Amino acid sequence: MTPFLLLQALILLGLIITGALVVAFKDLLAAAIAFAAFSLLLAIEFYILQAPDVAIAEAGIGAGLTTAIFIIAIRGTKRFEEKE
Amino acid sequence: MMKIALYSAILLVLFGGLMYLAADLPFGAPLQSDMDDYFIKNGQEQTGANNIVTSIVFDFRGFDTLGEATVLFTAVLGVGMMFRKMKEGEEYEND
Amino acid sequence: MKMTKIVRTTADVFYPFCLVFGLYVVMHGHLTPGGGFQGGAVMATGAALLLVAHAYEDITGRLRKTAMKILEAIGLMMFLFAGLSGLLFERPFMGNWMAFTGKWFSHPVAHGPNPGDLNTAGLLPLLNIGVGIEVLGGLTIILLYMLSGIHAEKKP
């Protein structure tokens, strides 16, 4: 039970860190990759909580398709956030 | 600086309130579970599928899945309308 | 605009594996976790890998918009007609008439935990395949529309 809880705590900590990185990055491509890492960690968390259906959907949609859509959108616009 | 402190305080209060509310909720033990027990007991027998989630999503609650498929179709239709080819001489309305 | 040769080669090598894994998730939807929507999303991820790595001109030969539109329509039609076919056999709409009849997809299922048999569950595999095809076509065509929009805007 204890190593399981430790793994879960590590994943939740990683979720908070990657979520903060998504907001903090000025390079939008790096932010998109950080969002993919966020989705992957969330999928692992769903799998630990015994919801494998949701985990597969999250890994496919969140980590795969959303990142592709963001990368295509960055390709069409600009890569770096402008300074205020 | 003042703003950041204010935002942090608001976030902390919201977080504390949510945690206080969530502390009393029973997790994983619903009060009424007659329907769940029925599905878990009879799902495999009535649909012949080993995966109970699929037997619920596609058989007991098939209309939900039909609605979901229709929603996806409509969303793709909307995207297709947004990216359609302009005809000869057609202009954007709000340029 | 296309990515470097390393990325393109990796995408070319990996996308068949994505498609095969998605097909596995769809076909075993009534036995293992997953189903039509999840499997279709995994297959669409394989297509997205190709779309992100290559330039739009190089990809139009392999993934066509018309084919994806037809796939999406076929998927929804398959779902609807599989549901309507219950009416022919004196069952309600979407009634599972195929299970336990001894023909396709209808072996008797062992009760309790068992290793699983692909030939069970009646109508559910058909509905799974329909939704899988629809999700594959729909999600891929959204990406294709976005890429073609960028392509048309940058050209003149």
Image (tube, coloured by chain):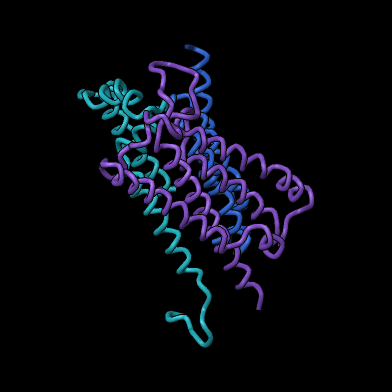
Chain colours: A blue, B cyan, C purple
Location of residue C38 in the rendering, given as x and y in whole percent from the top left corner: 49, 40
- Give left or right: position of B2 versus B61: right
Instruction: Work out whether residue C90 or residue A38 is closer to the camera in this orientation and state it.
Output: C90
- Give left or right: position of C90 versus B9: left
- Image quarter where the C terminus of chain A lies is bottom right
Indicate the quadrant where residue B26 lies.
top left
Above or below B25: residue A83: below
Location of residue B75 in the rendering, given as x and y in whole percent from the top left corner: 42, 58
Location of residue C107 in the rendering, given as x and y in whole percent from the top left corner: 43, 26
Q: Name the residue located 46 percent from the left edge and 17 percent from the top edge.
A: C114
Residue B5 visible in the picture: yes
Above or below A73: residue C25: above
Q: As drawn, which residue projects farthest toward the top? A: A1
Instruction: Work out whether residue B50 or residue A18 is closer to the camera in this orientation and state it.
Output: B50
- Give left or right: position of C61 versus B41: right
Residue B63 visible in the picture: no
Indicate the quadrant where residue C123 lies.
top left
Instruction: Work out whether residue C138 or residue B28 is closer to the camera in this orientation and state it.
Output: C138
Q: Name the residue located 33 percent from the left edge and 23 percent from the top edge.
A: B45
Q: As drawn, which residue projects farthest toward the bottom? A: B89
Location of residue B73 in the rendering, given as x and y in whole percent from the top left corner: 42, 56
- Give left or right: position of C27 versus B54: right
Q: Name the residue located 36 percent from the left edge and 40 percent from the top edge.
A: B11
Q: As drawn, which residue projects farthest toward the right? A: C5
Instruction: Work out whether residue B1 or residue B45 is closer to the camera in this orientation and state it.
Output: B45
